[in-house]
Image: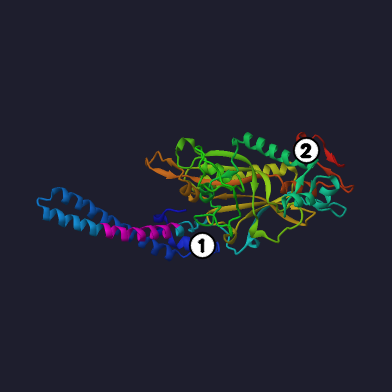
Amino acid sequence: MLDIQFIRDHSDEIAKAAKGKKLSFDIDELFAADRERIDAAQALESAQAEKNGLNGRIGKAKSDAERQAAIADGKSIKEKIESLEPAARESKARFEALMALVPNIVAPDTPDGGSDEDNVEVSRIGALRDFGFEPKDHIALGESLGLFDLERGTKVAGYRGYYLKGDGALIALGLMNYALSKMASKGYLPMITPTLVKGFPLFGSGYFKGLEYDGEVDEIYQVASSDKETDGSESKERKFLVGTSEPSLLAYHSGETLEASELPIRYAGFSQCYRSEIGSYGKDTKGLYRVHEFMKVEQVVIAPADVALTDAIQEEMLGITEEMFTELGLPYRKLRICSGDMGTGKYKAFDLEAWMPGLGRWGELGSASNFTDWQARRLDVKYHDPETGKKIPAYMLNNTALTSIRPLIAILENFQEADGSVVIPEVLRPYIGKERISTVR
């Protein structure tokens, strides 16, 4: 969410961003709603001021007739206020609903494009392996080595369900431990975050398309059962399962005003992640590439309102993930995300993709995004600016450090041998306890 004055001052840029991001957002409709909101609020305030003045008239009345006249006027004003209040509420609600749809502007050097096919490759690191044999995909490798069970996963959990077993489970957990250790060594505070959250962290971070949860478009699981308050009464708060620890980390400082000297704040959150994947129905229906739940280590940075600084921080975040991919021995490429593939609140974004030879394609392993103050305004995270003395919304960035499943796919497919075994990357061997997976554990 952006400041309305910023929107007025940058209306052309925001309209261009909406068009580039393929959003059905009409900035003129927002301005009309803003005018209606202001007019309705001013009319109500005027009537309320008139009512307050009448209260004084009643108290100062010098005769019964004068007092009765003031009372009659008071009843008329009360009726006027009662008629104005619904319009004020409705115009405010309409304005807020439209404000939730306002996209962030994009960085000036953002590539134009209509879809992920127009993302621009920035770099490619690591040579693609010449196997000398026909490489298997992760499904065949996992089944032959007993690393996971898709059939029983579907039986128990439904579509996209799975079990990780034996060395498959150890690799997934090893990836998470390796990532958290790496983040800590780079100055990021490790945190295990809530996965069951209220709605405001998801709205605040942009995981709701509008003001409220919409199960038709938001790839979020809502928890059906009700919760209890401390007094035993039924909670009115709806709860949701997060798709990443990003909302929980960003909301950690919601409603707070930080000191400039504290920034930037670097967090690394570990969590189980849940995604309904409703927008990806029919895609990657086999194997583990697209699943409903997985583990992830996410980086989040809360920074001062400085674009140049956050550009550098975004590269720092990406650099740590790239360092891990290099240590894991995975060939990967870095993509600059085009306007048509960017989310509503993103200012600048990159994806990192690893080569998956068994699948015969590049596979996304994570993304890094700079939201500037779009999320912070929603979550009310500010800091004291020492130069102006004002409270300023912070800038917020996030990056996928490492997930548990897609890197597992890339490792199995890139490090397979002709005999069906899989070599374990050296950095993961302390967590697995072996150099190679060759038999079912």
Above or below 435: residue 124: below
10 Å crowding of disc 2: few (<14), some (14-19), many (20+): few
- Magenta stretch, main secondary structure, is helix
Depth order, front residue of 416/63: 63
Tag 1 secondary structure: helix
Estimate the spatial distance between the alpha carbons at disc 1 and disc 2, rounded to whole Å: 46 Å
Above or below 274: residue 108: below
Q: Is residue 124 visible?
A: no
Depth order, front residue of 386/155: 155
Tag 2 secondary structure: helix
Q: Residue furthest left?
A: 62
Marker count (numbered) = 2
Please give the range of residues in magenta. 78-96
- How far from the left and from the top, in percent, is residue 199? 53, 49
Colouring scheme, one of rainbow, by chain, secondary structure, one colour: rainbow
Depth order, front residue of 178/238: 238
- Does the magenta portion include 179? no
Above or below 101: residue 255: above
- How far from the left and from the top, in percent, is residue 312? 55, 45
- Does the magenta portion include 88? yes
Q: Which mark is residue 18?
A: 1
Depth order, front residue of 389/121: 389
- How far from the left and from the top, in percent, is residue 249? 55, 42
Q: Which mark is residue 426?
A: 2
Q: Amino acid at mark 2?
A: Glu
Q: Amino acid at mark 1?
A: Ala
Disc number lying in front (1 or 2) = 1
